[in-house]
Image (cartoon, coloured by chain):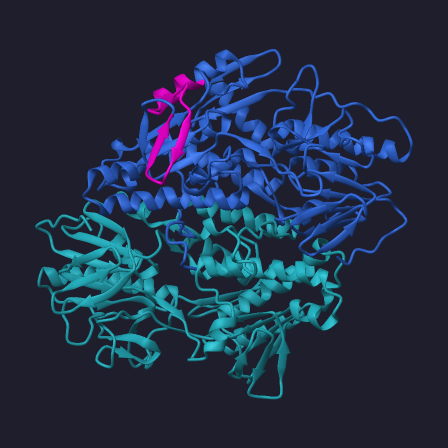
Chain colours: A blue, B cyan
């Protein structure tokens, strides 16, 4: 890969998400050679992907070029690479652009959509975990409305205007809220030839409440807000299959829809060579100790969604979210230096600073340690926190402008089909 | 297409570019049924495409959803459609989503890249006339630099860092300037492992001056500015072929490059059923009279790039640019109404309000009727005019923020490979 070894230890980081970037920043002024590998040349601010899918934000606002993040760090190297395997014997990472020897390896490869083995659902549903997926969903939604105009078959028309979101976590809830706002504020004006009141948005949750990672109040209020927006919330319903037209469940309930969004689960994105029972635990994540080390290795670490750190407070591992990822990245940054200098490492302890989710254009639910609140004020908190954590002043300005505009004008302007999804053979 | 006829005359407009949109806006409050067809659901502000290719603007900033433009106009209908043919006998438009009868037809289908019959160039070069093409170019530029890092073969490395732009009109010149700024300001920081001074940018012009539609001063100054930015300007050189690696010309000059951008010519995008010698003239445009009517027809019109209106002042037709398109759309809007009311129509007379081009981050050349100027002040004029003509307040704000940021920070943030171009089989 044309990276010359230096006298410094070489740390290879797989993944430029929240964890990988936090770690890289922490290591920036140290006597180390750091190589970061990612299959994309940008970092994605995943919490705002649903805004891209619904035309409220441009994709570029939530994507940040990794090279730009790293540009002022001496001894840092970025390579655009697909990591295919880890060779534990030779301490090498094998990628599509070559092999790379490491002294220390940090796997921060994140998570991917979990279809729980259902290949039909994987084939026919839409995921929303990356920018291209979100853009495909944006195109599909708009293309479906264009197609709805052209059919006189009412069943077909209804199926095209139906949206079924599987998963009542923050992803599903936020997407549902945004779709409901579009249905209310924008569709009637954009599609005067359609009775867009017939469009239905469904959230299907297998458990007995939505936002189950949050407080009971948050969960109840969020459901309330969604229902006021006209979203149909189905609890204790598990989707069993989807063939592109019909959604079947473990009850009598079925849905006819052209758009199924699968937000029902994620699993770790493990890597060949580090897979198998020895390393991987439930949720397809790497089992790590309190120093984020993989079992049996001093010099191989995992952080973020792909790492499963078990403790009394988190018996099935830390939540797969941005905050734990960032904190682990930070902590590991310090720990690696301690390790190299033969100092004792500090065990990781997650500080939960709060969980929040937004519903529609001006409501949110926020659980902080001591205070929990829901409604419009919560929405301001949500907006402030997300703006703060976006990387880059320009991104923050652009997102802020978009949101002010969306709010004041009750409109979303990025309703563009730039790469058609249904007619994928073109371009 | 599910559009019910009314008692009003139906006007079908093919194309939502500058001309089609200007016409639609003019007809908005009239007793007419207007149907606008476009293969995209958005209008593109083409003059700023080169900024998308070079990561200075997000694509959504220069794209505006057509439904949003039309939403307040009663009796307006938009359909996302590929127009395949015009049936002159039955007065019908034949599209991929059905047929549509018209009382009046306005063809505003614009122009497309002209490869002058060279199929190799068409296959291997990059065009920059649409947003997907500009995004593909953005991806290719960035992917080439990533690949340059990985090769130890100096010839291959140089070819990956070479950019050859064919065409010395505003498109080629503006793209060259933007690439030169990236080479100077951004590449060294993003790619510390590469000697980016070796990157070369070439503009190849078949004639004896660049910007030949502008004054001699503008042309000379623009060349001067480009050369100060390190761009190589080649005049009186005609590119004869490109096979993906080597560019051959009608002189001894050849180039080794992985990136050839073809900005050397456009031709009208005519439609089957209206093609052939009877209607089409040089540049593959429809010959129209001073009322924009096609030869032999009262009720079929053409405006914008696809129309060729000959006059003493413009013996080969109006220039294929935004201004003539907008003015024709405006004028035809009035003329159609006069025609329907059996009033005499007004012949079109193009008012040239000025031509301008920008070179790099703070220079431009501007030719107004009475004043011609070049340099930094011209750049402010250029920026103001382009902001003014962008559709939509939010787009203007976002573009303005991006430009202020780019200028102050000497940076461009949208350096993202969202849809890889070289590895197109993925996604």
Instruction: Decide which of A219, B377 is in the foreground and name it.
Output: A219
Residue at 78% from the left image edge and 34% from the top image edge:
A333
Can you give x and y, in whole percent of width and height, for residue A285 in the image? 65, 32
Q: Is residue A53 above or below residue B396?
A: above
Is A223 contained in the magenta span?
yes
- The segment highlighted magenta reads A222-249
Instruction: Decide which of A51, A40 is in the foreground and name it.
Output: A40
Can you give x and y, in whole percent of width and height, for residue A296 in the image? 80, 32
Can you give x and y, in whole percent of width and height, for residue A399 in the image? 52, 38
Residue A363: image quadrant is top left
Q: Is residue A198 above or below residue B145?
A: above
Can you give x and y, in whole percent of width and height, for residue A215 in the image? 53, 13
The residue furthest bottom is B251
Left or right, A300 with respect to A119, comes to right
Residue B262 seen in this snapshot? no
Instruction: Decide which of A77, B394 is in the foreground and name it.
Output: A77
Is A382 contained in the magenta span?
no
Left or right, A5 with respect to B79, comes to right
Count of numbered badges drawn on the protein? 0
Residue at 54% from the left image edge and 13% from the top image edge:
A372
Left or right, B255 with respect to B11, comes to right
Residue A271: image quadrant is top right
Left or right, A309 with respect to A253, comes to right
Residue A214 seen in this snapshot? yes
Residue at 34% from the left image edge and 59% from the top image edge:
B17
């Amino acid at each position: 890969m044309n990276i010359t070894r230096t006298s410094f230890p070489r740390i290879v980081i797989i993944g430029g998400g929240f964890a990988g970037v936090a770690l890289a920043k922490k290591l920036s002024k140290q006597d180390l050679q750091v190589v970061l590998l990612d299959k994309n040349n940008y970092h994605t601010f995943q919490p705002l992907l649903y805004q891209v899918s619904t035309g409220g934000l441009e994709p570029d606002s939530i994507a940040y070029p990794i090279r730009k993040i790293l540009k002022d760090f001496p001894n840092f190297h970025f390579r655009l690479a697909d990591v295919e395997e880890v060779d534990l014997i030779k301490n090498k990472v094998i990628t599509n652009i070559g092999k790379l020897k490491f002294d220390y390896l940090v796997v921060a490869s994140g998570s991917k959509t979990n279809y729980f083995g259902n290949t039909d659902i994987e084939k026919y549903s839409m995921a929303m975990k990356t920018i291209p997926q979100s853009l495909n969903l944006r195109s599909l939604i708009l293309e479906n409305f264009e197609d709805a105009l052209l059919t006189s078959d009412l069943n077909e028309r209804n199926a095209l205007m139906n949206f079924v979101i599987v998963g009542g976590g923050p992803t599903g809830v936020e997407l549902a809220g945004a779709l409901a706002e579009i249905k209310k504020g924008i569709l009637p004006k954009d599609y005067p030839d359609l009775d867009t009141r017939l469009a239905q948005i469904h959230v299907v949750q297998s458990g007995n409440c939505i936002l189950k990672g949050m407080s009971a109040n948050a969960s109840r209020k969020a459901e309330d807000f969604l229902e006021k927006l006209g979203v149909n919330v189905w609890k204790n319903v598990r989707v069993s299959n989807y063939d592109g037209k019909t959604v079947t469940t473990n009850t009598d309930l079925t849905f006819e829809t052209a758009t199924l969004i699968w937000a029902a689960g994620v699993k770790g994105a493990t890597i060949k060579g580090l897979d198998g029972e020895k390393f991987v635990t439930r949720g397809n994540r790497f089992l790590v100790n309190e120093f984020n080390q993989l079992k049996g290795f001093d010099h191989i670490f995992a952080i973020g969604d792909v790492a499963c750190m078990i403790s009394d407070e988190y018996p099935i591992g830390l939540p797969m979210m941005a905050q734990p990822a960032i904190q682990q990245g930070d902590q590991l940054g310090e720990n690696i230096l301690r390790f190299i200098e033969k100092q004792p490492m500090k065990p990781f302890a997650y500080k939960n600073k709060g969980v929040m989710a937004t519903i529609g254009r001006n409501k949110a639910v926020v659980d902080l340690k001591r205070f929990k609140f829901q409604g419009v004020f919560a929405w301001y908190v949500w907006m402030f926190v997300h703006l703060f954590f976006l990387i880059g002043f320009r991104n923050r300005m652009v997102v802020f402008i978009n949101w002010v505009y969306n709010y004041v004008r009750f409109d979303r302007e990025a309703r563009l089909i730039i790469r058609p999804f249904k007619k994928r053979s073109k371009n």
